[in-house]
Image: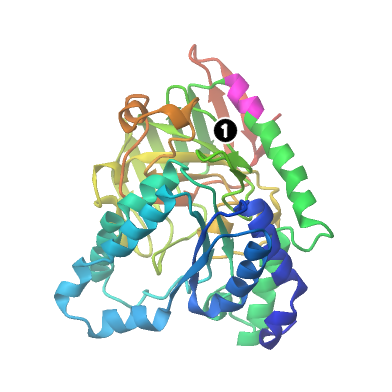
Amino acid sequence: MTKTNWDESIELDKLAELSIKTGVALQPGQDLLVTAPLEAAPLVRRLAYHAYKAGAGLVTPFYNDPEVVLARYQNASNGSFDKATDWLYEGMANAFDNNTARLAIVGEDPLLLSEQDPETVGRVNKAVSKASSPLRERITRFDVNWNIIAWPGARWAKRVFPNLSKDEAQVALAEAIFKASRVTTLDPVNAWAIHNRDLRGRTQWLNGKNFAALHFYGEDTDLTVGLADGHEWMGGASVARNGVTCNPNIPSEEVFTTPHALNVNGYVKSTKPLSHQGTLIEDIAVTFKDGVITEAFASTGEEVFLKLLDTDEGARRLGEVALVPNSSPISQSNILFYNTLFDENAACHIALGQCYSKCFKDGDKLSNDDVVNRGGNNSMVHVDWMIGSVSMNIDGLDAAGEVTPVFRNGEWAL
């Protein structure tokens, strides 16, 4: 496969078919909204083909162009950086209220904004976070079936494989994406059915234990994460509020739940870089006290990270905790993707900001106040970053303080 023959790529077509059938699990007559980088048009076209073949009502793509993004930072007036397309997010939220499915394609350059003023980047990120609140609320409530997949963007590929030519890097990244997404198998849909069954076994064990907290400890980490009252572990295929069973993330190796926003204490250091809104943030180190980050550092991108923490009160608290063994295929690939969709599936991780209300028992019946009263966090952001490694140990603590090994040296202790 070369860059010039995407239309002939069997794996790209299989990824599109998998996304429609298993990822978003599009229903007959259901509309589909797709967001994607401009260069991902070949994948969008294959998605539209399989969506309409599955009986889609209307497929509507929205493209973003990195050159347009950079043009703003290079030429816009100062007032531009506090604005966001609130009308677009409101329109998308309205579409979801009318049962439109959501599909997002990632593939942007993870360092697109690395040379821009961090203060300006922070202002834009805050404006977008505020304007997109109606959209984010519906996704974190899991109102509709949704899915995220990846396109091997040329600039992204060169970040991942800097020693290869542009075309060779894109082919290498495409192959890594296809392998991680299980589309190199003879029957990707069946492969995901088996994978979902395995993840479900993990969530059933954790839900049966009903731990009150998890204790993470290892190199540069000693962190106790309380779990929300009535929390529920999820992973792989999940049922949205509209009744559709979908796989939100392809790939996915995690099981995850909601921490208690007021009950996180200790310190933790990231084990992989975080690519956030075009900025690379490395060596994050934070201290929590009673759920709040009281100290925060980063060797690279610290100013952007601190701006993220100041987005709102909930940005300094946790909204997700996820478990991923070091033996996951993405970890074993030894590829640093500089993209959260992949890197979060190589290591245990935590997320700052908004929690998923779905990660509660009877979560689809809870109001926002109910979620907060059970310990769920509320914020305009949701940002995952990786803390797992081959040296990570995790203990489950029940209400009486009894300890059950969960991870030893980066692997499940079951």
Residue under the image location 49 percent in, 74 percent down: 37
The front one of 60 and 347 is: 60
Q: What segment is highlighted magenta in the picture?
A: 204-209
Residue type at mark 1 is Ile
Residue 2 visible? The answer is yes
Residue 406 coordinates in the image, percent (x, y): 62, 30
Query: Which quarter of the picture shows residue 403?
Result: top right
Q: Which residue is mark 1?
A: 394
Residue 364 coordinates in the image, percent (x, y): 46, 32
**Quarter of the figure that contains the N terminus:** bottom right
Q: Is residue 54 magenta?
A: no
| Callout 1: SS | strand
**Quarter of the figure that contains the C terminus:** top right
What is the crowding at mark 1: few (fewer than 14 residues within 10 Å), some, or many (at least 20)?
many
Residue under the image location 40 percent in, 39 percent down: 355
Tell me: residue 380, above or below residue 85: above
Q: Is residue 207 magenta?
A: yes
Image check: 87 left or right of 153?
left
Residue 156 coordinates in the image, percent (x, y): 53, 75
Residue under the image location 43 percent in, 44 percent down: 140
Residue under the image location 41 percent in, 55 percent down: 95
The front one of 153 and 335 is: 153
Residue 177 coordinates in the image, percent (x, y): 66, 66
The front one of 404 and 89 is: 89
Q: Main secondary structure of the magenta part?
A: helix
Residue 165 visible? The answer is no
Image check: 117 left or right of 166?
left
